[in-house]
Image (cartoon, grey):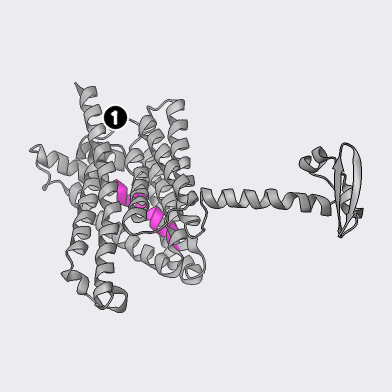
Amino acid sequence: MGQDRGKYDFYLGLGLAVSSSIFIGGSFILKKKGLLRLARKGSMRAGQGGHAYLKEWLWWAGLLSMGAGEAANFAAYAFAPATLVTPLGALSVLVSAVLSSHFLTERLNLHGKLGCLLSILGSTTMVIHAPKEEEISSLEHMAEKLVDPGFFVFATLVIIVALIFIFVVAPRHGQTNILVYITICSVIGALSVSCVKGLGIAIKEAVAGHSVASNPLAWILLLGLVACVSTQINYLNKALDIFNTSLVTPIYYVFFTTSVLSCSAILFKEWGHMGAGDVIGTLSGFLTIIVGIFLLHAFKDVSVSLASLAVSMRKEERASPAAAAANGTASHYDLLRGESPEDMETGPPFESVSRRNGAMTLCDH
């Protein structure tokens, strides 16, 4: 019964994580559509300080969709392992890119399509190989994990690194190095996901009828979540304001997900019962998602399609005989015709050469 319950929770968490990505990815499209409608009406744009979007129902639909997605993501951590839920957040980027190409007429080039395909393949691989059972089922068990020496050392190192970057590195290099602010967000993100996981379990217990409000750990986790999320939002906004979004998004995803996977392995021991094949499969899926996200973002402004590749190949084929002659080499086509490099180089410039049945005739123009 316990094993069946664990599988049920796993698939419920998986469904919540996927639905979260769909809601969040769709929310960007709804908000963008609402803002474009306002721009066509001549209203002051949000970037210029206008607030006309508050009267646009499409914008509110996007906001509600974002809230539903975040709620589903929060609930997913209560049922499925963080090793599965966190990497699947990349699907929201994929959903947003696909919907943008259909509803916002934003072109999705060949690199973007390959990135979407790789993200789907990587996500599928991670779902297949991710741990299926939860290692923590109650707040009491969570409290035991939090005082584990391994996690205590990990959390201490995370806090020290974050403080050094905030007070020493960021004032000097934050404006010029993209990794500074992203590193702060990522290492703090590992602790925020731990708090979300604990609060999800607390809500799960409260729904089951257990007394949670009197447990001090629930309030500690709530305060820790507020502090971590506030820090993440602050420094992520700084990174987005200074650097290109197409660079910030994939780098932040890689750093944040790597930090969360490390924390999950230490705190929740989610990797303890996984076989070598599942570990390799999970890491391979994660790396595949990274490559997909990179292709989707890094080359989104490059105009590349199958049609343009075909045109480029035809141009190269047309240019190859001239290039071969210039380099003193003949193409296979020229050799089959019986022409040698010497003929192409030394032949009269204003005469056409015709070879038929082994005889050569020069025709003056």
Which of 50 and 313 lies nearest the eye of the viewer?
Answer: 313
- Relative to 212, say whether 269 is above or below: above
Which of 58 and 266 lies nearest the eye of the viewer?
Answer: 58
Query: Looking at the image, which residue sits at the far left?
Result: 209
Q: Name which quarter of the figure residue 118 lies in.
A: top left
Q: Is residue 145 left or right of residue 113?
A: left
Which corner quadrant holds the N terminus? top left
Give coordinates of residue 107: x percent, y percent. 42, 57
Residue at point 46%, 66% (across, down): 243
Q: Is residue 148 visible?
A: no
Q: Which residue bears the numbered disc 1?
A: 133
Q: Name which quarter of the figure residue 40 lies in.
A: bottom left
Span colored in magenta:
181-194
Q: Is residue 25 left or right of residue 199?
A: right
Q: State the SS at label 1.
A: loop
Type of amino acid at the residue the image marks with label 1: Glu
- Relative to 184, say whether 336 is above or below: above
Q: Is residue 224 left or right of residue 204?
A: right
Which of 75 and 196 lies nearest the eye of the viewer?
Answer: 75
Does 247 lie within the magenta span? no
Does 190 lie within the magenta span? yes
Residue at point 25%, 59% (across, down): 30
Give coordinates of residue 72: x percent, y percent. 22, 46
Give coordinates of residue 172: x percent, y percent. 50, 71
Residue at point 43%, 53% (across, down): 108
Q: Is residue 6 left or right of residue 264?
A: left
Which corner quadrant holds the C terminus? bottom right
Give coordinates of residue 20: x percent, y percent. 26, 47
- Relative to 267, say whether 31 is above or below: below
